[in-house]
Image (tube, helix red, strand yellow):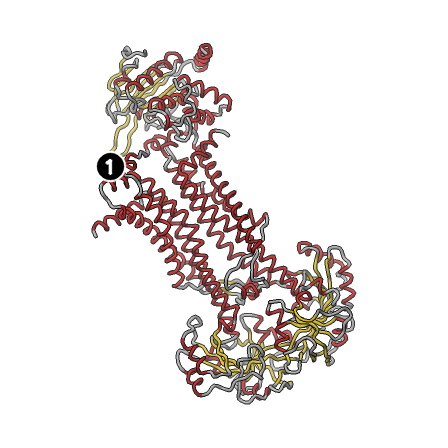
Amino acid sequence: MEMDVEIVCLEIRDEYCMSAIRCSDLCKTFRQGEQVITGLDTVSLSIDAGEFLCLSGPSGSGKTTLLNALGGLDTPDSGEIWIDSKRVDQLSKGDLADMRLRSIGFVFQSYNLVPVLSAQENIEFVMEVQGVPATQRRLRSTEVLAEVGLAGLESRLPAELSGGQQQRVAVARAIASKPTLVLADEPTANLDTHSAGQLMDLFVTLNRERGVTFVIATHDVRVMGYCRRLIKMRDGKIVSDEQQEPHAMAQ
Amino acid sequence: MSVTWRLAWRNLWRHSRRTWLTVGAMIFCNVLLVFLISLQLGSYKMMIDNTLNAFTGHAQIQHVAYLEEQKMRQSVPDVAALAASVRARDGVAAASARAVAFALASSDERSFGIQISGVEPDFEPGVSSFPGLVSEGRYLSAGAQDEIVIGSILAENLKVGVGDELTFLGSGLDGSFAAAVATVVGIVTTGFDEADRGVAQVPLSWFQQVFAMGDHGHVVVMRAQHIDAVPVLVEQLRVSLASQSTRTVRDWDALQPGLRQAIASDMASAWFMYAVLIVLVAFSVLNTQLMSVLERTREFGVMLALGMHPGKLARLVGIETLMMSLLGLLLGILVGAALTGYLSVVGFYYPGMEEMAARFNLPDRMYPEISVLSLLWGPLIVFVFALLAAVYPALRLYRLLPVAAMRAV
Amino acid sequence: MSATNTLLTLAWRNLWRNYRRTLIMLAAVSVGVWAMIFMTAMMRGMTDQVILNSLNLLPGEVQIHHVDYRRDPSVANRLPMPTGALLTALSAPPIEAWAARVRVPAVVASERDSRGVVLLGIDPATEAELGSLPESIVEGRFLADSNDRGVVIGASLARRLETDLGKRIVLMSQDPANNVADRGARIVGIYTARLQGSEDQFIYAGRAAMQEMLNIGESVTEIAATSHDYRLLGAWYTQLVGVAGPDAEVLPWPALDAFTGSMLQVQDGFALVFMVVVFLALSFGLVNTMVMAVFERVREIGLMQALGMRPGLIVLQLLAESIYLLLIGLLLGNALAWLTIKPLESGIDISSVAQGMEMMAVGSTLYPALAIQDMLLSTVVVLSLGLLASLLPAWRATRLDPITALANHR
């Protein structure tokens, strides 16, 4: 078992060596009735592969908008986004979807599992769409569920799992395709302290052992304590960008 | 079963009541269609059979102008021999020669102008249902001379019964005065006024004597082994009659053009009703699938965010609709077949229908006729329209933006 | 009162919260209602034609014969010309016209051929009032008066007899003593009719001339009366029964023409069956919509209950929503039916199936008839059954437990 995990890890490092993100002069505005709201205001940022980064700031500061732009969920009004050597903001909707499907994992605030599918099926469903053959789907989904600590709960429906467990299924779903980048939007917002801690430990482990780049938008101080780089945003601008020593370390 | 199919199936039952109501609409419509189409096809067949049995047979050989003008001199020579040669052909079940004339029939008390037919007593039962419907007395005997069989209403109007004599006055083929006396040997009751008022049959040989027809007659009536074989038979006969330009072969459609048209117009009004039902069911499916797509906007948003193509989601909705429609199709056919099957045995009656039925040579009780066609026709169309109804909800998925969709309640 | 007003406003706004669903249901109800009325108008148009055609053949909505005449249509069974009470009754409104005629089966012979026909000995003046004359005279003229010694025959019969205007034909029938009564007559006119069958069947001659030929003095075989509205067969018919005398049989048209009579009955029954069937197809969608509306608003309904709203008011609110939907659907459906039927009332050409229609005694043009009563019937059917269908989901809504309902997260 130990050996297996080791091999998987090595494989991953070999497959996607590094994934770096670079964006420059991103602007995005929204309309809300008469008002024009600034989502992003000339944001430039460079993230190296393997970073563990937090975007923080109050509601409406632009952190979710930035996250969505980086993940290709939303297109900026102007500016450029590069992931590795690929210009992302000019890709078609279909190519963006492919990129998300294969190389980016998403974790959302509310776990967003399909209520009528079991934990395992939720993961297999995404893999099926990725075109993974059935036997591999079964193996890999069992594997990632074990990795997020949910072995034995594969056949539970989301409603039969706690919030923390559901969020871990969502993480398992996000990493099942071995993405190099995980984008998480307020992943702990609905979780109690214990579950939040477990989730962050999981993130740190994945980051450390797999080299997965994590970008987490949050205003939860418990989460900020885990990251090595903290970017603060306000009114669509980056107001500070600091390296830090993680002070809440995995146990 | 892949996860997509499993997901589609479970999604159907997230609102089981809604799904059942939609499936119920399909079942209702399908059962109705199976029943009505079976009834329609059954009654058309009966209408054709009864009408052709009573009057025209499957096809006739006659003078080219006879159908239009029905004049005595538009005759066919050596008609009995011609009938015999037709009878000898493959695919012909029966053939009989007839001659027709107009005459004033008088009993002791009453006189009526009637159309009198000379028939071959030996062969007429093969092409017509009348000989089997003699309610009093007997049918014409083989080799008989001055015998006559008449319809029951005609008998009543003439005030004659079996054993009474009837006098005929008319004109022969050569224009000579034709007069004769015949004894009523049988009375035919068909239940159809037109026939009961009109039937008057005498033996052909005697008819030819009385009306100075020689060996002439007017038509050779025939029945094919099966009604579907009529076109082929008619074609063959046409070829063999090609040398005689005054004779022609007419199939039942040409002899009774009203029949097919009555069926066509009935078909048209029936299909109007079917179309309405099908459209309403399609609306029902559209409503359900649109609701189910709209209420899952958030879920679909997440799937899009995870990188799923809208096409995959549309396919999911398509599969859901397919499953729902299949359910409606199967249950509809099952229940429809059971109900129609039952009614095809015990029959079915609509109050006040007798007179209408009689006008179209139908019995009072209707028996729907189940066939593969009548079972599948309606439900398959409902099925197709149900699938089409899912197109709009499925297309909406292409307009979904992941960020906005995830924010939706 | 104001609480009810608020409730109705609330129901109205709720209806448009899920406007797509409402629009689809509206479309379904409108199409359903349109179909109900359209189909019925078509059927009614056809029935009207059948009846009018057969009344034209009869003609007259009420006919008086000798009691034995219908079984034995011979001049032996004849009646005297109306006098006294019968004459008074026939001249009183609402009877607008009446005519006495000699109607007997006969044989007609030209020099080429002979045929069985029905001979109508008429008085052109009174028949014109009755509206029973042939539709159009294509050659020659119609009979001048009761004493006219000519005959008017159908175009189709003329072809079959190979005769023509101005030629002589021989009419043969029998007198009351069962002697052959015959007479030569000149064809003074040729008519066409809607149905080819009637062209072949009826020959018109002067009544007095026929009475003379048949040797029946002043008597007739048929007296026909009309009020010019065949659907209203009321008291005047029974009045005639009272004064017609013991030898006479007074019959209204449904009894005279069983096919047509039953057709009208079957049609009325079928219109209702059709409407109910269409409604049932609709009802699934309607119930569905209501069920979903309740489902979506479980929390809201729970809140209302928690605030102390009586269950009756909740039912009322939901029913109001469905009534709004049905009323708009009815309005649209009726309007659509009116718009589609009105332009068609000048007639739809169905000559491609004319011979089939002739089996049903319909001519080659169909005139749809938009009847107020059908529009009303569809409204009654849709509203009453619609309310019935909405009752269950609405009632279920009131069975919700407010606490559970409020705790329900979507």
Residue closer to the observer: C132 or C348: C132
- Inspect this view and state whether residue B249 appears: yes
Q: What kind of residue is marked 1?
A: Glu
The chain letter for the residue carrying disc 1 is: A
Q: Residue at x 23, y 51 (%)?
A: C5
Q: Nearer the viewer, residue C341 or A161?
A: A161
**In the picture, residue C296 is in which quadrant?**
top left
Above/below status of A65 relative to B399: above
- Percent coordinates x, y for residue C65 in the rendering: 52, 80
- Neighbor class of circle 1 (other Cα within 10 Å; few <14, some 14-19, many 20+) is few
Residue B317 image offset from top left, x and y in percent? 44, 36
Position of C316 with respect to B197 (left or right) is: left
Q: Is residue B266 above or below residue C96?
A: above
Residue B362 falls in image quadrant: bottom right
Look at the picture and state if A107 lies above or below B55.
Answer: above
For label 1, the residue is A34
Count every numbered label the image shows and give the total: 1
Residue A75, position as x, y percentages in the image: 35, 28
Taking C120 as reference, is B166 left or right?
Answer: right
Query: Foreground residue, B305 or C284?
Result: C284
| Observer-nearest of C298 and C352 | C298
Can I make out residue C162 in this image?
A: no
Disc 1 element: loop
Tell me residue B119's x, y (percent). 72, 69
Q: Residue furthest left?
A: C2
Up the image or down, A34 lies above or below B380; here it is above
